[in-house]
Every structure is written in structure tokens, then in C-alpha cells.
Amino acid sequence: MPPKFAVVAPVAAGVTADPVWMTQFARHLESCGFESIVAVEHTVLLTEYSSVYPYDASGRVDIPADCAVPDPLELLTFLAGQTSTLGLATGVLVLPNHHPVVLAKRVATLNALSGGRIRLAVGMGWLREEIEACGAPFDERGRRADEQIDVLRLLWSDQPGGATHSGEFFQFAHAACYPKPVSPIPIHIGGHSRAAARRAGRRGDGLQPLGVAGAELSGLIALMRESAERAGRDPDALELSLGHLVPKVDADRAGRLAELGADRVVLAMPPVTDIDEARDMLSACAERLGLTPCR
């Protein structure tokens, strides 16, 4: 089966907080047959930081601190009202920045209002200064994230008497959280560490290890599957999302990613600011991939 194709909104272009631009972009994705749009997150960016960005040899993120980076769930909620079938995904939401009780409410609301179109891809974050600005302990974010995922799933489940949880980081009793999701909300784990692969196997619905290839990727996939089996879960039920570029991907390249096990290819956009140029780029990409012709 060929993979699905998602496209990341070009946050570095500074256009993702423009409602007209983003409406046209999302509607064009939908008309071209792409599966989903992906919104990234930075609650804050820092004018000065010592953390090392792990996805670029420079160690620096290519988004300036004054770039308008909208809240991904607010952006996706807006786009849900501008589209009808396009999937809505975070990629990734920085989980340590969020209290899970509040996050459960927000994501379930988006799920209900969009007719079940949300996919929640979460990451542990790399920018210590951002996470600490949001009040979370950076060095405990892994253990905290495991509990956050458990809390999300608990509050989304049917609990007639209200949900009760007593954990290391979060506690509540008899909490009724509505609306409930109209369909199960998949939680995918973003990251290229072994901890991310283990977390995907034990608790997630998929792994999104962008920027990894070769033996390292094979090892992460194997570890995810092994971790799922040890947790009594079906490894074949977990999805794998791999990355490529909108201007470069074609059917052959996508096919090779599918051979590696990709269920979805997450495509990065260059920092395009002209919406006509962006639409032309997406149309050409869709044609190369054999998707539904764009209107």
C-alpha cells in the first residue's frame, strides 16, 4: 500500500499566522489529495540560548526569535473550519510545555469539532530554555511525558464516575472531561532517540523519526516493535512516519520510504512566502506522487 502524504506548514517563512495565506494553503492541500497538514510548535523562541538544535549541523534552529509561530492547536482548529476532509496534525507538539488535563480538553475539543481529523504527534523538546520558561523541569521531561500520555488517554476514555489519577507529577480525582473524542486520537512520538522509539512502542500509536536513515533508522524501528511486544501491544498496529521534501520527493523516492516501512511521508516546505508559488509547488508535487489532480 502506498504511503500517505502530509505537508508541514512553512513556519520559517513567517506566514503561518496569516489567516488568508493559511486558508488558501490548506484548501489547496486538500484539493490536491494530501492526507494532512502539519503544524509545528514553539511556545516561545529565545533571542539567546545555549541548547543545541539536534536536526542541523550548526546546532541552531533556522527560525528567528521574532517569527510568528502560532499555537498549533489553535491554528489547526481554525483550519478545521476552512476545510472538510484534510487531516490535522501537530508535528510536533512540545509535550513538556503542556499540563495534560488542559491538553486533553483542547485536543478532544478539536477532535469533536473537526469530525475526528486530529493526529497528535508529540515530542520531548530540545530547547531547555523554552521548556523551563513554561515551568517544566527539563531533565524530568521523559518520565513526565509518559505520565502525560497516560493522563490524556485516561481523560479521553469513558469514565462515568469521573477519572482519578495519582502519579508522580499529576494528581486528580473524579474529573469528568467532556466532550469525548468522536474517534480515537492517535498519539505519535516524534524524535530520533532510542527513548522515543521505546515510548512509541509502549505508549504511542506511531513513531516519527524525521532526519534518520540507514542502520540508525532500522534500529529505531526494531526497538519500537520490540518494546510494543514486551508491553503486550501489537507492533503491526503502529504507524511509521518518515520525512522528505516537497520540491524533491517523487513516486520512486516515496516508494523507497514505503519499503522501509513508512505508512506516511511528512513533507517539509521551503520558506515560501508567495502563496501562488506555494500552490504551484504543491501541485507539481502531487502530480509527481500521482495524487488527485489539483483544482
Image: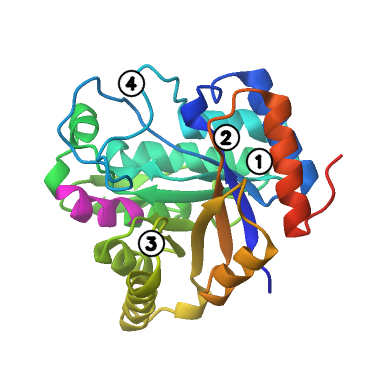
First-in-chain label (1 vs 2):
2
Name above or below for residue 27 compared with residue 208: above
75 left or right of 21?
left
Which of discs 2 and 4 lies nearer the camera? The answer is 4
User: In the image, which disc is placed on residue 65?
Assistant: 4
What's the amino acid at mark 4?
Ala
- The residue tagged 3 is 212
Which residue is depicted at the point 33% across and 47% down? Answer: 55
Which one is nearer the viewer's eye here, 148 or 70? 70
First-in-chain label (1 vs 3):
1
Distance in Å between CA atoms under marks 4 and 3: 26 Å
First-in-chain label (3 vs 2):
2
Q: Secondary structure at mark 3?
A: loop
- The image quadrant that residue 64 belongs to is top left
Q: Residues within 10 Å of mark 3 (few under 14, many from 20)?
A: some
What's the amino acid at mark 2?
Leu
Which of discs 1 and 4 lies nearer the camera? The answer is 4
- The image quadrant that residue 126 belongs to is top left
Report x, y in % for residue 236. Answer: 51, 79
134 left or right of 190?
left
Residues shaded magenta = 140-149
Which residue is depicted at the point 42% across and 56% down? Answer: 210
First-in-chain label (1 vs 4):
4
Report x, y in % for residue 132. Answer: 18, 32
- The residue tagged 1 is 114
Which one is nearer the viewer's eye here, 293 or 205? 293
**Secondary structure of the magenta portion, mostly?**
helix
Which residue is depicted at the point 26% across and 66% down? Answer: 194
Name above or below for residue 158 compared with residue 179: below
